[in-house]
Image: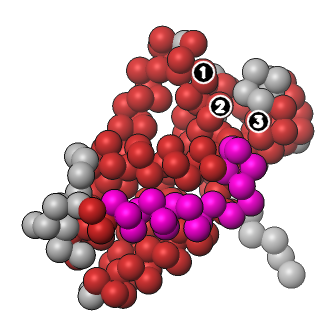
Amino acid sequence: MIKKRLGREESQQVTRDKLFDTATDLMIKKGFHAASVNTISEEAGYSKGAFFSNFSSKSELLLQLTQRFKRVEIDRLGSTLAAGYTAEQLTQGLNAYIDTLKNNTNCAILDAEMQLIALRDEEFAKHYYDLHEENSEALGRLITIIFNHAGKKPPLAYAALARTFTALSEGLILQGHKDPAAEIKLVLNSLIQTAEPL
């Protein structure tokens, strides 16, 4: 079988994906500061020059990496919500989504790393909080649909609602809960039941 030669853009994407995967593994095992550009490059099988031809800094790589994780989460929730039209189907879809959060340990660790960096680095914080707010707004809109389908008004604005949901799920994961679904469902269902009607 003849191996297809990759074009420039495809080759660059393969390099970026390998750097993303390697950086993720290293940051989860060792933390952001211990995962140097040299180590990420070497373990991915590339030169330091290859790293800098794809990312201007380690901070940029981390931002893009987190964006990828958050987009996957938002897209998954969006697909879940789009799949059901009745309140019952929507609730089942949300419960199925919440059940998959146990697989988000890597995302929770990376987000915790970013939050700590943002608290200590003003320049990085500007980029992180913009990204976090954009994702929170999108996730909050999706969660609001669940309240509305139940005939209820969400108790918080979109972004605040999403931040609460994210803090609960990530907090439980970081505290060592292997499957935080039961607690998340309990809190969300309580919020829906006690919310004001539309």
Disc 2 to disc 1: CB gap under 8 Å: yes
Q: Amino acid at mark 1?
A: Ile
**Amino acid bearing label 2:** Glu
Q: Nearer the viewer, residue 143 or 168?
A: 168
Question: Which residue was labeled with disc 2?
Answer: 113
Q: Are marks 3 and 2 in contact (CB under 8 Å)?
A: yes
Q: Is residue 17 above or below residue 56?
A: below
Q: Main secondary structure of the magenta part?
A: helix
Residue 174 painted magenta: yes
Stretch of the chain drawn in magenta: 173-191
Question: Magenta span has 47?
Answer: no
Position of the C terminus by quadrant = bottom left
The answer to the question of whether label 3 and label 1 lie on touching residues, with beta carbons closer than 8 A, is: no
Residue 162 locus on image (x, y percent): 38, 49
* Disc 3: which residue: 27
Of helix, strand and loop, which one carries label 1? helix
Query: Residue 142, position in %: x, y?
Result: 32, 63
The residue that disc 1 covers is: 117
Kindly tell me whether residue 41 is visible in this rendering.
no
Return the residue found at the far left: 198
